[in-house]
């Protein structure tokens, strides 16, 4: 594929090092610099010029849950004869496209069509993935990672039980992806632990996986690399098992166990026969010395 001269010039302009001329511009560029702890990801929702009512409503429903333009995530909706009801979701790394996956909407039920109560905007969801494809197929593995990035919400230190009120469920089955959204209800159970019920709140989508544009394995590993400053320092002589139990190894000097005083307990006192043999051994040693 040949790249025109104007495109090369445009790419060269974008890649130039920008020097701030004011303090405000300097602060703006500092916010965009790489960080040790990644900031919350923003999503940009784009409606294509030929998007129909179904795609438009899907974008509105997604916006309800991801009102988030330093955007590292994007969703593009379009519709045409070749690819009807089309959604493209993707993410950026270092201001370049990392992954991009195209999904076709086959069935859609909007938030408005389901007349149950809704959860508040900005609620952090619990995300569930069902289906072997999410763990075995590379395209579905990346789709799983992309959906987690899109819907995970802000990072929080603590969560209270009453705050767990929203569930997103994704199922991969026979080449299709089923997306369901539930409100979690805590009912009385007669004990301290409440009884849990799920009530569908919408939206609901049946989608088919179409085209994918995935980053190479090397680039994907680079995007997932943890900075050295955040890596936990290894502690000597300490290990952990699969259950998270910590084990420590202590190094001690060699001990002479014969000098340990253990005869104060009744159970460890010598018997008369043992005393006689000990006395005989001591006498024999004295005779040899003489």
Image: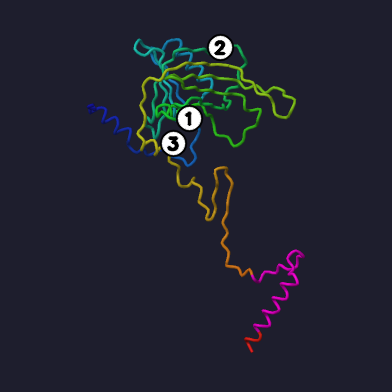
Q: Which mark sits nearer the N-terminus, 2 or 3?
A: 3
**Location of mark 2 (residue):** 112
Does 97 sit above or below residue 114?
Answer: below
Name the secondary structure under disc 2: loop
Q: Which mark sits nearer the N-terminus, 1 or 2?
A: 2
Label 1 neighbour load within 10 Å: few <14, some 14-19, many 20+: some
Q: In this figure, which colouring scheme has been used for the structure?
A: rainbow
Q: Which residues are magenta?
A: 258-285
Residue farthest bottom in this picture: 290
Does 254 sit above or below residue 72?
Answer: below
For image coordinates 70% across by 69% down, the residue present is 261
For image coordinates 61% across by 14% down, the residue present is 116
Q: CA distance from mark 3 to mark 1?
A: 19 Å
Dot 2 and dot 3 residues touching (CB under 8 Å): no
Q: Please give left or right for residue 279 compared with residue 93 in the image.
A: right
Q: Which mark is residue 32?
A: 3
Q: CA distance from mark 1 to mark 2?
A: 25 Å
Label 2 neighbour load within 10 Å: few <14, some 14-19, many 20+: few
Q: Which mark is residue 149?
A: 1
Identify the main secondary structure in magenta.
helix
The total of numbered circles placed on residues is 3
Residue 211: x and y in percent read 36, 21
């Amino acid at each position: 594929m040949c790249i025109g001269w104007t495109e090369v010039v445009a790419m060269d302009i974008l890649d130039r090092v920008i020097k701030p001329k004011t303090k405000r511009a300097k602060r703006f560029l500092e916010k965009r610099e790489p960080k040790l702890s990644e900031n919350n990801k923003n999503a940009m929702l784009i409606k294509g010029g030929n998007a129909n009512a179904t795609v438009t409503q899907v974008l509105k429903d997604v916006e309800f849950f991801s009102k988030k333009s330093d955007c590292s995530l994007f969703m593009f909706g379009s519709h045409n004869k070749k690819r009807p009801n089309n959604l493209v979701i993707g993410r950026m790394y270092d201001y370049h496209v990392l992954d991009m996956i195209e999904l076709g909407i086959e069935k859609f039920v909007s938030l408005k069509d389901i007349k149950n109560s809704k959860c508040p905007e900005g609620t952090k969801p619990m995300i569930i993935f069902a289906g072997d494809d999410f763990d075995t197929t590379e395209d579905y593995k990346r789709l799983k990672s992309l959906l987690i990035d899109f819907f995970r919400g802000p990072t929080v230190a603590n969560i209270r039980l009453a705050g767990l009120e929203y569930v997103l469920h994704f199922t991969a089955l026979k080449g299709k992806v089923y997306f369901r959204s539930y409100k979690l209800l805590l009912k009385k159970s007669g004990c301290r632990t409440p009884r849990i019920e799920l009530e569908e709140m919408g939206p609901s989508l049946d989608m088919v996986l179409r085209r994918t544009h995935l980053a190479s394995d090397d680039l994907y590993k680079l995007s997932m690399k943890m900075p050295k400053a955040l890596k936990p320092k290894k502690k000597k002589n300490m290990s952990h098992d699969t259950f998270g139990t910590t084990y420590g190894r202590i190094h001690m000097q060699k001990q002479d166990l014969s000098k340990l005083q253990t005869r104060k307990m009744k159970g460890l006192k010598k018997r008369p026969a043992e005393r006689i043999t000990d006395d005989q051994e001591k006498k024999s040693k004295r005779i040899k010395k003489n």
